[in-house]
Amino acid sequence: MTEPVGMHGWPTGRLLSTAARLVEHSWVEALEQLGLSHAGLIVLHVLGAGALSQTELAKVARVEAQTMSRTLEGLERQGYIARQKHPHDGRRHVVTRTPTGEAAWVSARTLEADLFPSIADNVRLRAELLAIIHATAVGRWDTD
């Protein structure tokens, strides 16, 4: 594979940053066609294991409860999730993925392979990216 003209001498960090921006644009466009956002996709993924409270979802997604609330409002408007009162605690709600949300999740599950089919060693790439994230996140946020 040849490098685009002028990028040969770029530091790895700049290449990574440029790749991240381009991947982000591709993801956003593809997700918008499904009526999803990154946060919405994360919620649908996590809910595949079963119902959770808004607080639990926010913790898993590493966002504030208020941010999660906005994400859930959008998913609920589209019929992707449902919120019901917790059976043992009427002050809490549990969030579940609806059949429509399941269909959206199934459609979105292959986005990575559809958008980036040329990545030969995805397992190694993921391991390297996680190593970079772990090394640079120290002191910024919990990487467990």
Image: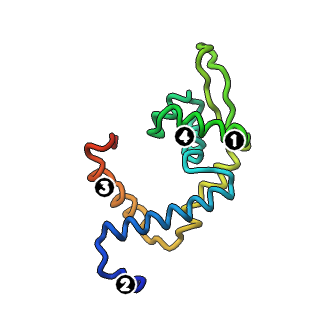
**Image disc number at residue 46:** 4
Residue 6 position in % (x across, y down): 37, 84
For the residue pair 136 and 127, the one nearer the viewer reads as 136
**Which amino acid type corresponds to the residue marked 1 in the rendered image?**
Tyr
Mark 4 and 2 residues: CB-CB less than 8 Å, in contact? no
- Does residue 84 sit above or below 24 in this rendering? above
**Which amino acid type corresponds to the residue marked 2 in the rendered image?**
Gly
Which residue is tagged 1? 80
**Image disc number at residue 112:** none
Residue 95 position in % (x across, y down): 62, 30
Q: Quadrant of the C terminus?
A: top left
User: Of label 4 and label 1, which has the lower sequence position?
Assistant: 4
Residue 112 appears in which quarter of the rendering? bottom right
Residue lying at 33% horizontally and 42% vertically, measured from the top left: 141
SS at circle 3? helix
Mark 3 and 4 residues: CB-CB less than 8 Å, in contact? no
SS at circle 4? helix
Q: Decide if residue 143 is on the left or right side of residue 77.
A: left
Q: CA distance from mark 2 to mark 1?
A: 44 Å
Q: CA distance from mark 4 to mark 2?
A: 41 Å
